[in-house]
Amino acid sequence: FYTDTEGLAEKFSKLSDVRFVVAPIPFRHELIDQADSGQRQKTVRRPLNVVCHGNARTEKGYHFLPDVVASLWTSHVETGKLHFTIQSNFDRPFGELHIRRARRALARYPSDKVKLLTRSMTPGAYYRVLAETDIALIPYQASIYRNRSSGIFAEVLSEGKPAVVPAGTWIADQIDTSRGRAFDGPDDIARAIAEIVDDYENFASAAAAHVATWRRQHSPRALVSLINEHHREMIGTAR
């Protein structure tokens, strides 16, 4: 059987006699390349676009965002260093109560400073937003994502974006301090964003340099190659 992180493979293997193997995440890179026409940003725009992808729900830390915006408002938003684009569509009819409250709080800000995307996006629209991202905000709850992967995060790395991620997770293990910052709890998210903004050129350069490595490791071709390899092993063992 297959899973996509080392932590999950270890946990699942302990629960049974079945062997679990870590597989690549088979993301189709051309979807991103089509969205930005293969032209990655050459010059830095200001304000930087800090984007939170994914629908608005608890495990993704959406309810942390009003405090994040408030913490950075005077120092970074009003001064023109950054603005936010936040995917804000609910994952269920009417959303969770505290998520609705968080969205109302975010909606009080000017839309040119905090832009809320309140409707589900087509794949094309989603990848255009990803292509326009300068800093990817992944405010997920560490306790839930300890060993989990994230398709959105895999896409962020495939596009070469600096990221803010939860410490103590598989997600955080995939970046070093040159390509992003890990936050230790919701009160630390603003600090992590500010550190990337204040040294953005170096973070962006390091993240872009890692794209080829990440794409070699995580692609449909890499997944098929792994499955074929294990299939050959099983045939050899059965003989």
Image (cartoon, rainbow, N blue to C red):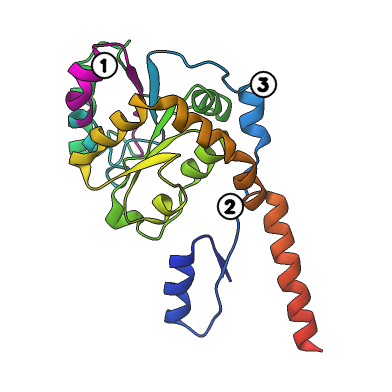
At which x and y percent is residue 140?
Answer: 32, 45
Q: Which residue occupies 46% across, 48% down? A: 150
The secondary structure type at the circle numbered 3 is loop
Label whose residue precedes the other's in the sequence (2 or 3): 2
Relative image position of residue 91 (x, y in whole percent): 36, 39
Residue 109 is covered by the magenta coloring: no
**Residue at position x 40%, y 44% in the image:** 177
**From the image, which quarter does the C terminus lie in?**
bottom right
Highlighted range, magenta? 68-91
Kindly identify the amino acid type of the residue bearing the numbered disc 2: Ile
Sequence order check, earlier mark of 1 and 3: 3
Please state which of the two labelled residues, at mark 1 or mark 3, is closer to the viewer.
Answer: 1
Tell me the distance, in whole angstroms, between the alpha carbons under discs 1 and 3.
29 Å
Residue ID for mark 2: 25
Please state which amino acid type lies under the numbered disc 3. Ser
Q: Residue under circle 1? A: 77
**Crowd band around label 1 with a 10 angstrom C-alpha radius: few (<14), some (14–19), many (20+):** some
Residue 138 figure quarter: top left
Of tags 1 and 2, the one toward the viewer is 1
14 vs 108: above or below: below
Q: Is residue 25 left or right of residue 82?
A: right
How far is mark 2 from mark 3, CA to CA? Answer: 23 Å
205 is higher (above) or lower (below) than 148: above
Q: Is residue 188 visible?
A: yes
Q: Is residue 99 left or right of residue 55?
A: left
- The secondary element bearing badge 2 is classed as loop
Task: Please say whether residue 90 is one of the residues in the magenta stretch.
Answer: yes
Give amino acid for label 1: Val
Numbered label attached to residue 37: 3
The residue lying at 41 percent from left, 26 percent from top is 200
Residue 88 % position (x, y): 34, 29
